[in-house]
Each structure stands twice: as structure tokens, then as C-alpha cells.
Image (cartoon, rainbow, N blue to C red):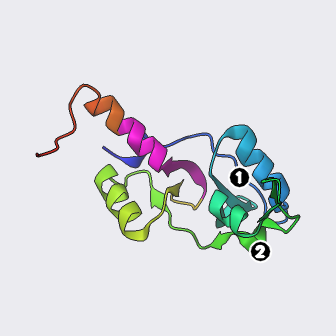
Amino acid sequence: MRASATMTRTVIVIPPEVTLDLAWGLMQTHRIRHLPVTRSGQLLGMLSDRDVLLHSSVGGDGVIFVPQTPVGAAMSPAPFTISSDTSVGTIVRLFTERKIDAAPVLSDNGRIVGMVTTTDLLLLLLEHKEAQPIPFEW
């Protein structure tokens, strides 16, 4: 099975000039944890919810204050990417080795055509193994 069978095809992207508070709002509204950062269709970086939280603070009342810092200052530059013909096994291995939870899927010309996340991989596992017990040995 290839990445194209498991990826999210509708990907929300943001430019690096957008502020973290607006990006956080998008993440909350769309219930996503990663936003590719692009300019003119080219991938510049990846913003994760962890990146946002690292630049934020928590008030005494537990409310998270997300600053108006540009996304470009908080994103991870040059993110790990995959192609639509990358196998699911390779994706799982690379996610585990690199300790990442998402990868943009790029076309041959470098455009984002989708995104594979750990959630996509878990849903794929659920589809194929839903009725089977966990193979624990006692």
C-alpha cells in the first residue's frame, strides 16, 4: 500500500507571515495539529501544535496565550516529505525513527498533494485489524 491510499488530500496551508495566534485558531477550528508553511505553492516549513505551544505561555487561570509572532519564526524549516508512491511500511519506519507525526506528500514538481499523519496510519490499521485482538503474550 502506498501513501496515496492513506493520505489526507485536503491540506490547509499558511504563509510564513501569518501570526501564531491565527495559525492556532485554524488548528483549533479544523482539529488539526500540523500546518505546512508555503509561499507561491512551495513548501518552506511545517508548523506543529508543539511549535505553537513552545512559543506560547499559560496564564494563572490556565488560559494559553499565543503570541502574534510570525509563523516563519516558529516553524520547522525543511520538513521531512514523502511522495505518493512511498510505502506505508516506509512511512511508519521513518515516522518512528525521526519521531514525527506528519509529512507532506509532494508531487514530482514539489507541490503539496496531500499529508500523511499518524492519525491516518492509525485509521488504516483500524480498517484492516478492527476485529483482531491485540497480540499480547502473557
- The label shown at residue 13 is 1
Element under label 1? loop
As shown in the figure, which amino acid type bears the numbered disc 2? Answer: Ala
For residue 41, side relative to residue 61 (left or right) = left
Q: Is residue 48 visible?
A: no
Residue 114 rendering spot, x and y as whole percentages: 55, 47
Q: Are marks 2 and 1 in contact (CB under 8 Å)?
A: no
* Residue in the picture at 85% in, 61% down: 19
Q: Return the residue at label 2.
A: 73
Q: Nearer the viewer, mark 2 or mark 1?
A: 2
Q: Residues within 10 Å of mark 2 (few under 14, many from 20)?
A: some
Image: 123 above or below 98: above
Residue 101 rendering spot, x and y as whole percentages: 49, 57
Quarter of the image with the N terminus in it:
top left
For residue 26, side relative to residue 3 (left or right) = right
Residue range in magenta is 111-124
Give the spatial CA distance, label 2 vs label 1: 16 Å
In this view, the residue farthest toward the right is: 68
| Residue 105 part of the magenta-drawn span | no
As shown in the figure, which amino acid type bears the numbered disc 1? Answer: Val
* Residue in the picture at 37% in, 63% down: 96
* Residue in the picture at 35% in, 56% down: 92
Image: 96 above or below 2: below
| Residue 112 part of the magenta-drawn span | yes
